[in-house]
Amino acid sequence: MSELFVYGISGEALPPVCVRQLESCTAVVVSKRFTSLLPEQGPRRIAVAPVQEMLVAVADALQTGDVMVLASGDPLFYGIGRTLIDRFGPENVNFYPALSAVQLACACFKLPWDDLVLLSLHGREPGSLAGRILPHTKVMLFTDHRNSPDRIAAILLQTLRKYGDEKRLGKIRVRVAENMGTGDEKLTSGSLTKIAATRFGPLNMMLVEQDLPVMNLPVFGLQEGEIIHSRGLITKDEIRAVILHCLRLPARGVFWDVGGGSGSISLEAARLVPELSIYTIEKKQEGLENIRRNIACYTLYSTHLIAGEAPDVLEALPDPDRIFIGGSGGRLAEIIHHCAARLVKGGVLVASAVLETTAELAPQLMRKDGLKVSVKTVHVNRQGTSAEKEKQFNPITIITGKK
């Protein structure tokens, strides 16, 4: 059977071994960027995009001979390599990588990269960019025409200003390397403000660096005293643990925290599952300010603070995989109805109830809206040292509905 030969290109010329191999190929897959590197007379050219059409054309060309694919850098590092292996099998694909864009950028920046966080935005939805970048000391981004350095910097600026995190804003350093390995290579460095106001060519890598304080916190288990709240209005540690267990958070997706209060449930969820997009809904100004400060304190920018009252503000949010209702403001029936309708198939809705009337009504409403319901009541008693008097808290009923 004919074979695929995948050559990584770094710089402005084809490697001699690639030129020799090309002479025996029946077709070559090439992007506009590398077209000028090919000899005028040569095998049939196949455009790399659209990818599905390219794969069909390659399969057809393989019936008559070998096919070459020209790719940027290392084809197996955020490149076309995975797609080719999945389609044609590893036994039929041969790789000849060049220096990757990450290697070239780190060489330009004189930056060791064994501890670098890598984030590719090539043809991908960015998700919560601030939430994926800001928790780390240094992040290298593969940008594209939609997610350009200026746009990314503007998003980080907007997010940090929204949450009043001016201290962090002033410490972030950005470097951008354009057209690496070519005669047009250019390096730009500066603040988020400078980068947001600068325009860049389409071929670039972006580095975001900052000095983060060492907090030495556990992965799970923030205590009430570590979360900013008002007048004791916070979900107790033990109850928070049970609620998060009932939610069974997915590795990624959308989570609504309705009636956020201090944001304690959102904070724990964001720390447990960094790729989860969290929307915390709160209507009280005091609560909003507490949540805003907690998000900034723990660098949990995958959490989006939504000011307003449910269910009114829920309409504009993406459909959730998980929902927690911690407060309803007397609109429990409306909120549950809206949440049950928007919850994705297989999703989970959890509500907590202090009042007996709520504990009785919530399961009825969930069942009415087609959810499979289970109910548990949690009693919490605390006693520190043997000399301290045991402290008993009001029982909390936790209602779980599954779609």
Image: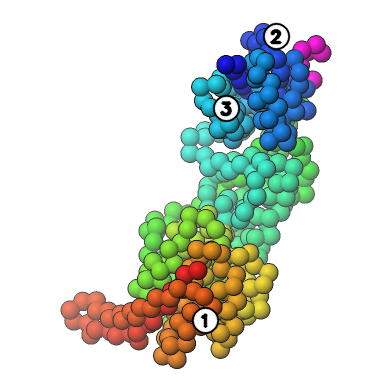
Question: Does residue 377 lie above or below 174 as drawn?
Answer: below
The x and y percentages for residue 96 are 58, 19
- Look at the image and give the residue range highlighted in magenta: 36-42
Res. 112 visible in picture: yes
Mark 1 or mark 2: which comes first in sequence? Answer: 2
Q: In this rendered view, identify the residue nearer to me: 295 or 340.
A: 340
Residue designated by label 2: 23
x 69%, y 21%: residue: 61
Spatial separation of the CA atoms under disc 3 and disc 1: 50 Å
Q: Is residue 280 magenta?
A: no
Residue 368 circle label: 1
- Bin the neighbour count of mark 1 within 10 Å (Cα to Cα): few under 14, some 14-19, many 20 and up: few
Disc 3 element = helix
Q: Are marks 1 and 2 in contact (CB under 8 Å)?
A: no
The x and y percentages for residue 147 are 70, 46
Image check: 17 left or right of 327? right
Q: Quadrant of residue 354?
A: bottom left
Instruction: Please name the amino acid that badge 1 sits on.
Output: Lys
Instruction: Please name the amino acid that badge 2 sits on.
Output: Glu
Q: Nearer the viewer, mark 3 or mark 2?
A: 3
Question: Does residue 74 lie above or below 20 as drawn?
Answer: below
x 57%, y 74%: residue: 339
Residue designated by label 3: 88
